Image (cartoon, rainbow, N blue to C red):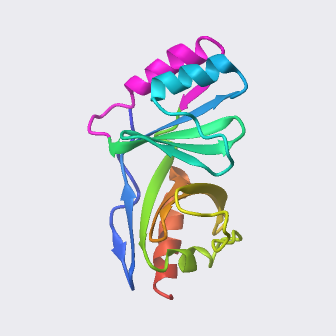
Amino acid sequence: MLNFISPIVESHSYNNFSMKEKTPIGKINLRGNLENKDFASTVGKILGIILPKEPCSVSTKEKITCMWLGPNEWLLVSNDTITKNSNDYELEKVLFNEISKKNLGAVTNISDQYTIFNLTGSNIFEILSKGCPFDFNSDKFANNKVIQTILNHTDVTIHKKSESDIDLYVRRSFSKHLWDWLKDSSNFV
């Protein structure tokens, strides 16, 4: 059963910075070898998009966003919230039957493992820079890119949708800690 209970019970806005939790959202970890034509074509047919193969790249379709996490790993994220009290997703079933069962790769539902903070405003990267070693001014971190880094001693994945809109993925067990840190940090920008 999908865990709809979250330690985050508020939204926060301060000084042209806003944050809220996006929940519940379906998330699937997909692993496989793009050099394997069976894997690549099967996934492409199921998702209706080509898996991103460049580091930090993202592919988006109407209902799903696919983020490159490594040479053989992608994060598939639903673009819609889930309205049912179950983590039984049709996409996961189809991928599992066509990829995992046929030994083409691995499909894992990680919806309960991660939560998403949506951060908006003109000073997002100034706030994130207080606790992150990544250079957010890098030309390589353009819009619609994804990175994995450390933020305030916590592993995170950051999807930059635009200069003023990002989704920050954090393990649920660290979410309250990171939420409080972001909230405090935004008050001093």
Q: Quadrant of residue 1?
A: top left
Q: Is residue 25 left or right of residue 167?
A: left
State the residue lying farthest toward the bottom: 188
12 over 75 or under it: above or below: below
Percent across and percent down for residue 136 are: 63, 71
Q: Is residue 157 magenta?
A: no
The total of numbered circles placed on residues is 0
143 over 59 or under it: above or below: below
Q: Quadrant of residue 94?
A: top left
Percent across and percent down for residue 55 are: 69, 49
Q: Is residue 178 left or right of residue 7?
A: right
Q: Is residue 171 visible?
A: yes
State the residue lying farthest toward the left: 83
Q: Residue at x 45, y 29 (%)?
A: 48
Q: Residue at x 63, y 69 (%)?
A: 152
The answer to which of 57 and 109 lies nearer the viewer is 57
Q: Residue at x 64, y 30 (%)?
A: 31
152 over 43 or under it: above or below: below
Q: Is residue 79 left or right of residue 31?
A: left
Q: Is residue 95 magenta?
A: yes
Q: Residue at x 51, y 14 (%)?
A: 97
Q: Is residue 105 visible?
A: no
Percent across and percent down for residue 114 are: 51, 47
Q: Quadrant of residue 10?
A: bottom left
Q: Is residue 59 left or right of residue 82?
A: right
The part of the chain drawn in magenta is 82-108
